[in-house]
Image (cartoon, helix red, strand yellow):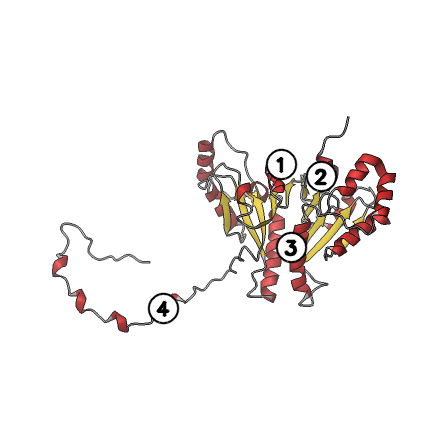
Amino acid sequence: MSQNNGDTLTARGPDLTSGPDLTSGPDLTSGPDLTSISKLKPTTCQPKPPKPENAITIGISAQVLFNMEKEQQGLEDYIKYQMEHEMQPFSPGPAFSFVKALEAVNTQLKELYPDSKELFDVVLMTNNHPYAGLRLIKTINHHQLFIERYCMTGGNSPIGYLKAFHTNLYLSSDPDKVREALKEGIAAAIMLTPEKITEVSNTQLRVAFDGDAVLFSDESERIYKSHKLKKFLEYEKEHENKPLGHGPLKGFLEALEKLQKKFYDKGQRKDCPIRTYLVTSRGAPSPAARALKTLYSWGLEIDEAHFLSGAPKGPVLEKIRPHIFFDDQMFHVEGALKIGTVACHVPCGISQEPAPK
C-alpha cells in the first residue's frame, strides 16, 4: 500500500471544499467484478503450512532447537539483552538436525502429493517474552527453517497450549514441563545434548525407540524390577499372545507410520525417507515375540527391531545414527549421549520411581 505524496491536510493547505465534484466521478458500479478479485489468491514460493487437524505437530522448546544463553538476572535485563543482540543468530541446538529432517520429509511429500496437508508442522514453544522472541524469529530465518507457528508465553508455561496446537510430540530440556505434558496425555521427552553430535542423514528421518515404558506400557518392566529375570521370562512366556498396553510414545509412532504409508502407496517402501527402529533390552524368545505381536495387534510396523537382551545400546545406535532416540532409563540415555546420539529421556514408568530400600 503506497502513500500519496500530494498536499497534506493542514490549516494552510488547499481549500478542499472547492475541489472537483466527486459525485460526478466514474460509475463504480460498472467497474470490474470486485467479488472475483477478492477470490484471487496471492502467489507464494513457499509451501503453505498444514492445517492443524491434518498435520503431525511437533512442539519444540527454543532451548533445544538452538543453543541459547542462560537467562540473565531479571526479566527486564534478559529482554534488553536479547533485543540488543537481535541480529546475532543462535547456533543450532540438539533438535536442529531433527527439524531439518522433518522439513526434508515434507519436501518429498509435497512433490508426491502437492495438495496434501498431511505434513510435519513444527511449532516453536517458548516461555520467552515476545520482544525477546524477535531474536528467535531472526535466527529461524537465518537458518532457513520453515517454522511459521510460535507460542511465546512471556514467562508462563507453554504446556497449557499444547492441546490447542494439536501437539503430537513435545520436546524440551525442562523435566518439569515434560512431566506436565505427559500428565496431559501428550507424548513428550526431555532432550539432552551430547558433547559432540554425530553426523546424521540429510535425506532420511531416523527415529529410534525403546520398548517398555516408551512404546509399550511398563507392565513387564514392573515384573522384572520386582521379581528379577527368571520371573520376568516366565511371565512373558505366559503372556506372549497378550498385547502390551500403550506407552507414551505409541501415538508418535502411529503418526510416523501414517506418513510412511503415503510413500509406500507411491512405490517408495524401499526408499522411504522415514525409518523407524526398536532398540530394546528385551531378548528372545518370548519377550521379543511379545513385543512384535503387540505391534502387529496395533496394526503398526517397525522397520528394524534390535533385541539386545540387556547388552549396551550404544554400538547399535552408533550404526543406526538416528536423529533422535527415546528411552525411559537414564543409563541407556547416557550411553547414547557418549557416542554422540541426541537422546531423549521419557520420564515414565517404574524406572522413575525410587528404588526400594
Mark 1, other Cα within 10 Å: few <14 / some 14–19 / many ≥20: some
Q: Is residue 205 above or below residue 342?
A: below
- Give 260 or 334, whichever is nearer the viewer: 260
Q: Are marks 1 and 4 in contact (CB under 8 Å)?
A: no
Tell me the SS state at disc 2. loop
What residue does disc 1 label? 175
Badge 3 marks a residue whose secondary structure is: helix
For marks 1 and 4, give the CA distance. Answer: 53 Å
Residue 286 drawn at (x, y percent): 85, 49
225 or 197: nearer the viewer: 225
Res 270 label: none
Residue 220 in the image: state x and y as whole percent: 79, 42
Tag in front: 1 or 4: 4
Q: Is residue 53 left or right of residue 315?
A: left
Element on which disc 4 rests: helix
Which residue matches tag 2?
Answer: 349
Q: Nearer the viewer, residue 293 or 124?
A: 293
Q: Residue lying farthest top?
A: 357
Mark 2 vs mark 3, CA separation in Å: 22 Å
